[in-house]
């Protein structure tokens, strides 16, 4: 079964980013439930920024799940990445993500590594940088395994990262890891930029996909741009995907309209 999810960001520094709801956690949860979503994906400043008992109370009240937790605040607020040339910064990045993994695991939710993967620095060595990424994913994959969840790695488009930009590149990289507890995030916005054929890429790399981000061609809510979602939905069904499709999209033209557009598209193809 495929499940729907909105996104709620509680990090002021990323307020201009592609998330449906902002700042008010209770209101975002309530609105998500009223529209019929199955869960929420959450972005917090840190693992200890939110009382897990409070979150559990609100999720249980509205019969929602926590679909995933984002780690991007580690880079935005603290400047941490897994591929920084400074080993102390890499160590801090691993510690930050480990704490986010532990927080999400309380709800059976995986953590996402997106922007915290970093980049090959100017004049940096690509192989060395990928080696640092591998070391980080190896350790964090096992941390997640010990907590009973998997870890999600997100290939980003070329304008956000010069590491691994496609599902194929991500799959090939995961195949080199000793840990088998890392899965890919198929983000339709990034894929729209990098993939030749989105459905074919999903079919070819389906065994590694553990999470999906819904966004249309302009990163607005799915169904508001020119991405043909029908074949994508069929591809997800064909690989027997059984996770969340989460609306990481700009709240265009506003949060309520974006959430409504997303759930209508979800219900059209998955209900």
Image: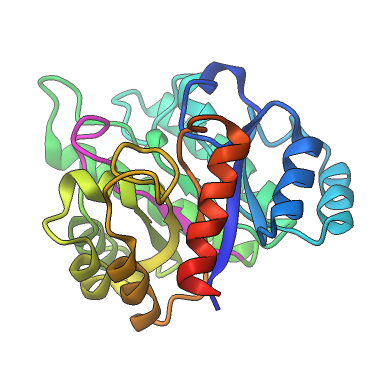
In this rendering, the answer to whether 91 lies above or below 216 is: above
Instruction: Please report the residue visible at 59 percent of the width from the left and 64 percent of the height from the top.
Output: 149
191 to the left or right of 101: left
Residue 245 lies, in percent from the top left, at: 49, 60
Residue 237's place in the image compared with 256, above or below, is: below
- State whether residue 177 is above or below residue 16: below
The x, y position of residue 133, in whole percent, is: 31, 44
Q: Is residue 41 left or right of residue 232?
A: right
Q: How is the image coloured?
A: rainbow
Q: How many marks?
A: 0
Taking the magenta stretch, the answer to whether it contains residue 260 is no
Judge whether residue 29 can be spotted in this image. yes
Q: Is residue 222 left or right of residue 25?
A: left
Main secondary structure of the magenta stretch: loop
Q: Which residues are magenta?
A: 149-164
Tell me if I can see residue 110 in this picture. no
Residue at x-position 37% and y-position 28% = 87
In this view, the residue in front, 13 or 192, is 192
Residue 148 in the figure: left or right of residue 177: right
Q: Residue at x 27, y 52 (%)?
A: 227
Where on the picture, by quarter, is residue 89? top left
Image quadrant holding the N terminus, namely bottom right
**Which residue corresponds to the image point at 23% horizontal and 40% vertical from the top-left?**
157
């Amino acid at each position: 079964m495929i499940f729907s999810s909105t996104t709620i960001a509680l990090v002021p520094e990323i307020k201009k980013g592609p998330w449906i709801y902002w700042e008010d956690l209770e209101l975002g949860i309530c609105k998500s439930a009223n529209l019929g979503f199955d869960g929420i994906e959450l972005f917090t400043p840190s693992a200890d920024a939110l009382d897990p008992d409070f979150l559990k109370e609100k999720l249980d009240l509205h019969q929602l799940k926590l679909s995933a937790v984002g780690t991007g605040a580690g880079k935005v607020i603290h400047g941490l990445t897994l591929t920084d040339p400074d080993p102390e910064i890499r160590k801090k990045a691993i510690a930050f993500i480990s704490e986010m993994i532990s927080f999400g695991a309380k709800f059976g939710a995986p953590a996402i590594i997106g922007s915290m993967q970093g980049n090959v620095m100017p004049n940096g060595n690509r192989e060395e940088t990928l080696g640092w990424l591998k070391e980080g994913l190896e350790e964090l994959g096992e941390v997640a395994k010990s907590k009973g969840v998997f870890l999600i790695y997100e290939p980003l488009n070329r304008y956000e990262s010069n590491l691994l930009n496609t599902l194929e590149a991500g799959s090939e990289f995961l195949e080199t890891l000793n840990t088998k507890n890392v899965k890919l995030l198929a983000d339709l916005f990034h894929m729209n930029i990098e993939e030749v054929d989105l459905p074919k890429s999903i079919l070819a790399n389906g065994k590694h996909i553990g999470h999906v981000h819904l966004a249309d061609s302009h990163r607005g809510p799915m169904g508001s741009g020119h991405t043909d979602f029908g074949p994508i939905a069929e591809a997800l069904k064909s690989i027997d995907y059984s996770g969340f499709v989460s609306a990481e999209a700009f709240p265009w033209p506003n949060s309520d309209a974006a959430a409504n557009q997303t759930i209508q598209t979800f219900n059209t193809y998955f209900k």
